[in-house]
Amino acid sequence: MRTVIQRVSEASVTVNSKLKSAIGRGLLVFVSIEDTDTQDDIDYLVKKIVNLRIFNDTDNIMNCSVLETGGEILCISQFTLHASTRKGNRPSYIRASKHDFAMPMYNAFTAELSKAFGKPVKNGEFGADMKVELLNDGPVTIIIDSKCKE
């Protein structure tokens, strides 16, 4: 499971020209699932995301988590995070899970994220063509892959 986490001042997702979800200050989380992902991958990423200290404290040092700041979370499924560009110029998405495996995993991920966060996590629409708008704050962008625990 691979995530791209962005600290945002605001973010929103639109599906079929209709606003699906929007947040103010918080985290925009893009997530991609692969067939080898398990509940352990979900647990690892959820714990990392809600406790990631990338918000400024009173001394203007990145020392606070989204839990401590009262921010919001918007989670978007994005299979292209598993793109392989090793050969040629056309990315291969062979590592990205198909809908029948990825959707339940995505739903489990967002449910666990909401539980750990203590409030609902907003999301897009799995598998839809989404338009995501964001105002990256910092900019701060973090990539976490559950298979590469650095």
Image (cartoon, rainbow, N blue to C red):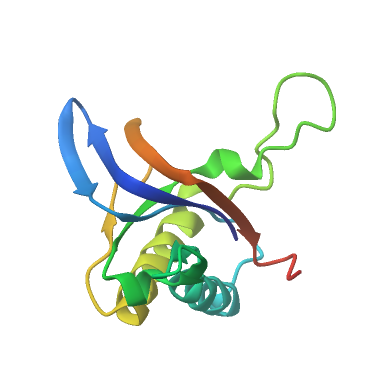
Looking at the image, residue 27 lies above or below residue 68: above
Let me know if residue 43 appears in the view. yes
The residue depicted at 34 percent of the width and 77 percent of the height is 68
Classify the position of the N terminus by image quarter. Answer: bottom right
Is 113 left, or right, of 40 in this rendering? left
Front residue of 149 and 55: 55
Q: Position of residue 53 (x, y in %)?
A: 51, 70
The percent position of residue 63, horizontal first and vertical second, equals: 50, 72
Q: Quadrant of the C terminus?
A: bottom right
Q: Quadrant of residue 20?
A: top left
Left or right of 39: which side holds 76?
left
The relative height of residue 98 versus residue 35 in the rendered view (above or below) is above
Question: In this view of the protein, which residue sits in the foreground, 133 or 8?
Answer: 8
Percent x, y of residue 44 = 57, 77
Residue shown at 55% from the left, 49% from the top = 141
In depth, the one of 140 and 92 nearer the eye is: 140
Residue drawn where x is 48% and y is 43% of the image: 78
Residue 127's quadrant in the figure?
top left
Is 108 left, or right, of 22 in this rendering?
right
